[in-house]
Structures are given as C-alpha cells and as structure tokens.
Image: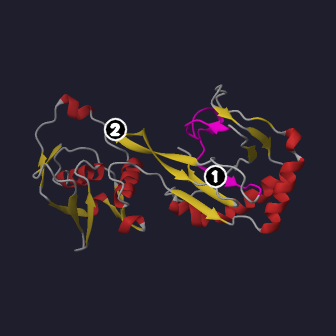
C-alpha cells in the first residue's frame, strides 16, 4: 500500500478518526508519520483486501501527550484527512512486500513525540524528581560516601570496552541499596506512566555509587545492551554533591531517535538533563 498526499508541500495532515458507535477523535501528524499509514491500512483491510500490517490495538497520544486514546483496530470505521491522502491499493511489488513496518511500540513512541511538537524525531520521556531524599538522608549518604573514598575503583561497562567510561565506582552498601530500592519502588506509580512503560512488577534494582571527578566521561551508550543488562527496562541516576556546587559539566544527554526501515535509529540531537543536587532522573533503558 502506498500513500499520496494531494498537497505535496503539506507539512502536517489533520486526521479525523471515525470510530464505531459514532465516536470520533482528531490528531495532527506529519505526512510520513507511521501512524497515518497504519490507520489507513486498517481501513483498507476492512473489506478483506490485502494491505500493510497494522496493530491490533492503537494507543495514540492526545493533548500534547497529557492524555491518550486507545481503541481496537476493528473499531476504526473511517479516516478523514486534510489535505486528502490517497491510498494506492495496486498489487504490491517485491520491494513493497519486504518493506518493514514499525511495531506498535515504535509507532506509539513516534506518535507521542509528534504530539509534543518534535516532528519526525522520537524524543524519549524523561522524569526528574527534585528533593528525592530528606535532608538527613542526604547528609547520611554524603558521609557514607566520603568515608568510603579509599574503596572506590575505576568504573567499567558491561561489555568491558576500554576508553569508554572514566569515573570511579563503589558497590552500594546494603543499607544504601535498601534505602534506594524503597524510595524507587515508592516513586513507580508516578514515574512509570510518564515513561510510557506500562505496568509491570519491578524486579531487581541495581545500585552503585559513581564518583565523577575532573575529566570524567561516559560515551554514548544504551543501558539495555548485551550480557547482564539486556532485560533492563529503565535507568535511574541520582545526583548529589557538596554545596555550594563546586564544578561545571556533568550533564546527562538523552539522545533522540528516528524511524528508519521500521526501527529506531540514533540521531545527533538530544535532551540535556542538568545534574541538580538531590534529584533523581528516570528514563527508558533502551
């Protein structure tokens, strides 16, 4: 299935969804947005004719990502587009048959980013919570860290790449891990919906103390790669430092993605997260 926008110069398409029971909803997406193709493919397949694959359930962000519309594909009875978008249902070529289609998860991420005004970029959600620990907890953590200075060792990455990360780390003592596991579990009802992860039982939570010294760095990477990290769902980073702040740098970069051949691929654009004292940042691990 191929689509042709009647106004080739159009940068966005207004889409009105007609749902079973007389309900309707409206969204605006770029012409090349995968959700547009999937919605039209769903309508095209109602009569049994072949079309591109589409999700069985749509979940489309609304109101700039503050709300979402979820409906089963069979409830979609029509789509009105402005400008008009024509569906070409000629017999597909070999290239068309082989063309990958974004998964529902990838399409949902792209739709959320488009709803928030990021165009074709997939901007991943980030949650930063200030004043995460109480004053006494921060003081205890600072004292524990300074007392353990001699036990810090050079940090490593899970695949043991060299010259990829420069910092010092300490395996978290049990008391520290218990504190953070409790605090993080308590924050999950607030954090998980914002990360668009869906609900699941949180399993193991890793905990270590990292000391970033002068010249420290950690190159671009994914936190759910190979080896022991491939099942990781989200990452957290808690920041604390002496006050007044005596350093510059240390910002966290969360890179945007783009959709190519139905998959997410890295781009050069990113969000910059400030390392604010006594704040914790949550983001998707992959």
Q: What's the residue at 56%, 46% (across, down)?
A: 285
Q: Can you give x and y, in whole percent of width and height, for residue 262 in the image?
A: 34, 40
63 is higher (above) or lower (below) than 122: below
Q: Residue 236: give its label.
A: 1
Q: Residue 260: give its label.
A: 2
Position of 67 with respect to 249 (left or right) is left
Position of 73 with respect to 263 (left or right) is left
Residue 80 found in image quarter: bottom left
* 114 in magenta: no
Under circle 2, the secondary element is strand
Q: How far apart, in angstroms, are the residues tagged by discs 2 and 1?
A: 28 Å
Q: Which residues are magenta?
A: 216-242
Q: Can you give x and y, in whole percent of width and height, for residue 184 in the image?
A: 68, 60
Image quarter (top left, top right, bottom left or bottom right) of the N terminus: top left
Q: Can you give x and y, in whole percent of width and height, for residue 255 in the image?
A: 48, 44
Density class for disc 1 (Cα within 10 Å; few <14, some 14-19, many ≥20) is: some
Residues at discs 2 and 1 in contact (Cβ within 8 Å):
no
Q: Is residue 160 visible?
A: yes
Density class for disc 2 (Cα within 10 Å; few <14, some 14-19, many ≥20) is: few
Q: Can you give x and y, in whole percent of width and height, for residue 136 in the image?
A: 83, 67
> Viewer-proximal residue, 27 or 220?
220
Q: What's the residue at 88%, 39% (across, down)?
A: 150
Position of 260 with respect to 149 (left or right) is left
The chosen color scheme is: secondary structure
């Amino acid at each position: 299935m191929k689509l042709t926008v009647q106004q080739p110069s159009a940068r966005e398409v207004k889409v009105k969804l007609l749902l079973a029971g007389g309900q309707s909803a409206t969204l605006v997406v770029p012409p090349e947005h995968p959700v547009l193709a999937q919605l039209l493919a769903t309508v095209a397949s109602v009569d049994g004719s072949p079309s591109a694959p589409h999700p069985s359930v749509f979940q489309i962000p609304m109101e700039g990502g503050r709300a979402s519309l979820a409906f089963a594909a069979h409830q979609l009875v029509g789509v009105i587009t402005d400008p008009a978008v024509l569906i070409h249902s000629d017999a597909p070529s070999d290239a068309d048959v082989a063309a990958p289609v974004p998964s529902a998860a990838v399409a949902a991420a792209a739709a959320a980013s488009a709803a928030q005004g990021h165009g074709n970029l997939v901007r991943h959600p980030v949650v930063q919570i200030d004043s995460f620990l109480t004053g006494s907890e921060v003081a205890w953590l600072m004292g524990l860290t300074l007392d353990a200075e001699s036990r810090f060792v050079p940090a490593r990455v899970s695949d043991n790449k060299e010259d990829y990360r420069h910092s010092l780390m300490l395996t978290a003592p049990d008391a520290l891990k218990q504190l953070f596991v409790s605090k993080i579990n308590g924050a999950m009802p607030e954090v998980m919906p914002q990360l668009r992860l869906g609900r699941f039982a949180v399993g193991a939570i890793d905990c270590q103390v990292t000391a970033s010294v002068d010249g420290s760095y950690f190159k671009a990477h994914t936190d759910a790669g190979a080896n022991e990290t491939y099942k990781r769902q989200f990452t957290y980073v808690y920041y604390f430092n002496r006050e007044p702040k005596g350093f510059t740098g240390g910002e966290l970069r969360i890179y945007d993605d783009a959709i190519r051949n139905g998959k997410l691929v890295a781009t050069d654009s990113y969000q910059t997260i400030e390392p604010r004292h006594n704040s914790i940042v949550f983001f998707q691990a992959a």
